[in-house]
Image (cartoon, rainbow, N blue to C red):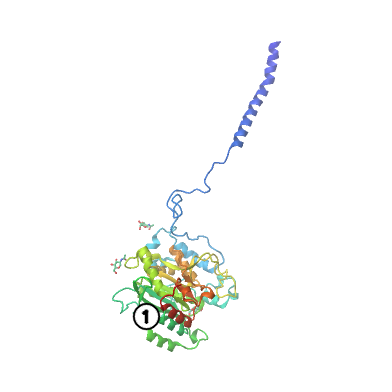
Amino acid sequence: MARCHSRILCLCLMPCLMVAHLLVYVVVSVCIAMSYHQPQLPVRFTATGVSSISAGLAAHPANPFWSLRLEEGTLWNQLQHPLDRQHNPILRGNSTNTSPMPAARAQEQGSPVQQEVPECSPDHRWVSLIRDFSSLPEQMRDFVLSMHCTQYPLLLDQLDLCSHEDGDGEELMLLVAVKSQTGNFEARQAIRQTWGASGWVRGEEGASRGLVRTVFLLGRQDGSTGDHPELGALLELENHRHRDILQWDFRDTFFNLTLKDVLFWRWFSERCPKARFIFKGDDDVFLRTRSLLDFLHQQEATLGAGPNGTGGTRDLVVGEVISNADPNRQPSTKYYIPESFFKGVYPAYAGGGGVVYSGALALRLREVSERVHLFPIDDVYLGMCLHRLGISPTHHPGFLTFDIPEADRGKPCAYRSILLVHKRSPQEILHLWAALQTPPPPC
Ligand SMILES: *[C@@H]1O[C@H](CO)[C@@H](O)[C@H](O)[C@H]1NC(C)=O
Ligand SMILES: *[C@@H]1O[C@H](CO)[C@@H](O)[C@H](O)[C@H]1NC(C)=O
Ligand SMILES: *[C@@H]1O[C@H](CO)[C@@H](O)[C@H](O)[C@H]1NC(C)=O
């Protein structure tokens, strides 16, 4: 009887025991799960490598990655996209470095810019790509109609500007290239008499000197390009006297200023390729040329300069750097860029009032400009070309393209630490120059 009793008991207890075991298992599992903490992993994974920030972080590429995403409905981005893909160093290895530019161009299927056959009459082929073309400001419409063309003949050339008869066979230290307009005779003359005087210039601090030459960059501005008085004969007289004017056959307008850079780089690589540095500025700036020479000598000393400008100053480009600027979207302003033309943030660029770069860089800018479509704002265009060369402009606090405080403008002392100031009339340039010739008063 007792046996039977225990058997019943066993039969009853068995499921209870199993349930109890299961319960223990569940409780233990839940406890383990609840006591689990996320392991303390780093926020983002970084491989070891060399980096400018910390030796513990991964190396980052020296060159920027090209944007592979295409912005729809914006003309410039659409035109530039295939060119950037074509020359993308990652997609195409390093073949673009070695292949000569004309060959690279010839490969471009349906490339909009034809270098071989310059066809520079207004062209409507891209108008249909801009949805609001007819409502755009006139200068934007003119730009779109002529932006396919970068071939304009020289009306005034200078063959011997860099063969410096007074140079004792020495190369040019600084080529000063000033963007000017036909009518600005006074500004050009003031520059020749002051900061743009050609010849040997001694630095302010060091005893080192350098050979400086100035050239003015002009487009065409006469009866054929708008309501302008005919000043051609005067200009010829001026050029006959000074031999320092380059003039190309295109309308000298604000949105055509980029052409002056592109055509100047071409002229430079043919006529002046050995000049060590270039200052490019407007004709309403004041430059302290002697201090700039000191600065350049100093850069050569610290960075090291090859005899042909191929050393450490190869990538030098210095000015007042503007970063992360958005295009101006105010239709009433001079700088207005509609969204149907360009979308995106401007690359870091140096204010156009004045910028200094090495001659070696100018040669490379000439090459890269063949594969960057013209952009209406010249200093942004320089930034776009630099971006594609993987170079960032260096900021220098001495470049004041936005002027110094009004109260200080009359005081020579305020100019002691600056290299460039904008904007100054011819009279102010002469006055400032004279004031800076006297030995510095205690500041
Ligand atoms: C890249 O350049 C290196 C060295 O100049 C060369 O050995 C290599 O073949 C090149 N690669 C390509 C894809 O051209
Ligand atoms: C630039 O110059 C060309 C050639 O003279 C002209 O056709 C075009 O209208 C000019 N562009 C602007 C924006 O003025
Ligand atoms: C510099 O120029 C000289 C002669 O003009 C040339 O022999 C030399 O190879 C050049 N150096 C470099 C690094 O290009």
Q: Which residue is mark 1?
A: 158
Q: Residue shown at 43%/83% (left/top)?
A: 189
Q: Residue shown at 46%/54% (left/top)?
A: 53
Nearest to the observer: residue 123 or residue 92: 92
Looking at numbered disc 1 in the image, what kind of residue is underneath it?
Gln
Nearest to the observer: residue 41 or residue 284: 284
- Is residue 292 among what the camera can see? yes
Q: Is residue 244 above or below residue 103?
A: below
Percent across and percent down for residue 150 are 45, 74
Q: Residue furthest front?
A: 442
Q: Secondary structure at mark 1?
A: loop
Nearest to the observer: residue 70 or residue 184: 184
Tell me the quarter of the picture where residue 279 sits. Answer: bottom left
Q: Residue furthest left?
A: 168
Nearest to the observer: residue 49 or residue 157: 49
Q: Residue shown at 38%/62% (left/top)?
A: 97
User: Label 1 crowding class (10 Å Cα cut-off): few <14, some 14-19, many 20+?
Assistant: some
Percent across and percent down for residue 318 are 44, 68
Q: Is mark 1 within 8 Å of ligand 2?
A: no
Quarter of the displayed picture in which ligand 1 can be seen: bottom left
Percent across and percent down for residue 394 are 45, 65
- Is residue 217 among what the camera can see? no
Report how many numbered discs are placed on residues in the image.
1
Q: Is residue 139 above or below residue 60?
A: below
Percent across and percent down for residue 131 are 59, 70
Q: Quadrant of the N terminus?
A: top right
Q: Is residue 19 above or below residue 210?
A: above
